[in-house]
Image (spheres, helix red, strand yellow):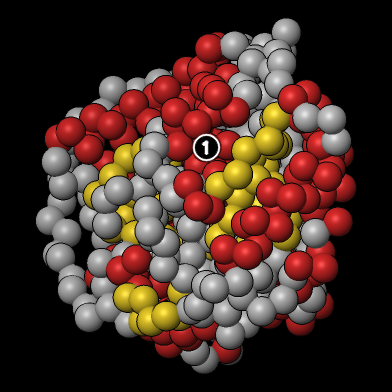
Amino acid sequence: MNRLLKITPRDMVAVALEPLKAGENVAYGGGEIALTEDLPMGHKVALRDIKEGEPVIKYGYPIGRALADIPAGAHVHTHNLKTLLSGELEYTWNPIEVPEKHLPPRTFMGYPRADRRPGIRNELWIIPTVGCVNDVAKTLAQMAQDLVGGSIEGVYAFTHPYGCSQLALDQDNTRKALADFAVHPNAGGVLLLGLGCENSGIAQITPYMGDYDESRVRMLVCQSVEDELAAGMELIQELAAKMRGDKRVPCPADQLVVGLKCGGSDGLSGITANPTIGVFSDLLTAMGGSTILTEVPEMFGAETILMSRCGTEELFQKTVHLINDFKGYFESYHMPVYENPSPGNKAGGITTLEDKALGCTQKSGSSAVKGVLGYAERVTAPGLNLLSAPGNDLVASTALAASGAQLVLFSTGRGTPFGSPVPTIKIASNTPLATKKHNWIDFNAGRLLSGMTLPQLGEELMTLVLEIASGEKLARNEENGFREIAIFKQGVTL
């Protein structure tokens, strides 16, 4: 087993694949280095002397500049490396040729929908339009648990604190997100639950839903009825009666939309888990399916790689706006644009935002960018899509589901138990995490370091996704009952 990895020939650092001790002579591709300091797993060592102010190369790109002279064999991290990034930039479109790949779509067993892509679950969702009726929604979900069974795979309430006291874009985004969930294919039935006096009530949300299957949506304004629980249960019973006739049927994988997300990343995430997801993304898009990459602030420093894969200048310009508009969002609140990575990222070996971004974007594989989406905008273009949303794990995963993802692939080096509204498949970057937190982790990409290849892992991940999409298996978050939504807050609260 390798103990130290130099990712590309250009790199000036290598990454420890296990904890290493000062004084050891450790081989890597192309040479051997004597360590002058202990090196935790996922952390970087200088392969040669690096001068103060010199750009440090990893993944073949700069990840920052040296704050002092760094001798060969020394630990390279936050004490001697700083980001090179600054504010908004001007970009030039320099497209590269991205070969189109085509594979026959495989199949999964899904629930056909009259108005949307097939669902991979047949659940009954209760969606409050405003936080004031959250407890009503939760009570209705508890009262309806006796209905679960057969083709009714669950009853869930997705509570949130918004829907009122919001303005402008902030309020508009809440309406769009709630409308997206009201027509999500994983919901075989939806009760849209309003209060009656909120800014974003049922009347304001329904126009954002577009054409929808009215037989699968019911609406209740609590202030308009005497007993909201009795009225709600009556509507839920109607939805359940419709859902009992639903059956899984073979569906082509080109109807799958899969969200791509990472969180609690470590220094191995960009080496094992994210490239494995990238292989999966290339496979699915070659079959005509769609993937969505988000967490825009974690693209900063690697955005030009994505821009070069835009096949048209229009897509390039949309990507430029995607990046610079998010930087402007930070600046409008007088916040630092590059306050990243997190303490957990740093403990795992990630030093700068460039370091994090170059690993993060590995999830996009090598396919061309086919779509660029605003927050809560639904996917229409087959292939790789970029989505405007922040890096926060639950907010970003919720945004992926709102844009139409039937499931989310979530890579992690540190581990996390949460679940989004859709199956959230956790992919460990290292075997110790997969072993320790087997109750959280669905897939171990750390096996790349012990003999498996990326094509093998990508193929295995595809098989797992199709099994979970078919209902043959549950994701760990589903087994644990962990699922919630977090809408992106972008403005003042009245």
Question: Circle 1 sits on which residue?
Answer: 179
Amino acid marked by disc 1: Ala
| Residue 257 against residue 88 in the figure, above or below | below
Place of residue 227 in the rendered image (x, y in percent of width and height, measured from the top left): 85, 36
Pick whichever, 286 or 364, lies toward us.
Answer: 286
Pick whichever, 128 or 56, lies toward us.
Answer: 128
Q: Please tell me in which quadrant of the rendered image residue 25 appears.
A: bottom right
Q: Is residue 168 left or right of residue 153?
A: left
Pick whichever, 494 or 100, lies toward us.
Answer: 494
Place of residue 136 in the rendered image (x, y in percent of width and height, measured from the top left): 84, 39
Place of residue 340 in the rendered image (x, y in percent of width and height, measured from the top left): 62, 37
Q: Is residue 83 left or right of residue 462?
A: right
Residue, x 80% and y 59% (percent of image)? Answer: 144
Residue, x 65% and y 45% (percent of image)? Answer: 191
Q: Quadrant of the C terminus?
A: top right
Residue, x 37% and y 53% (percent of image)? Answer: 115
Q: Please tell me in which quadrant of the rendered image residue 262 appears.
A: bottom right
Q: Is residue 314 left or right of residue 339?
A: left
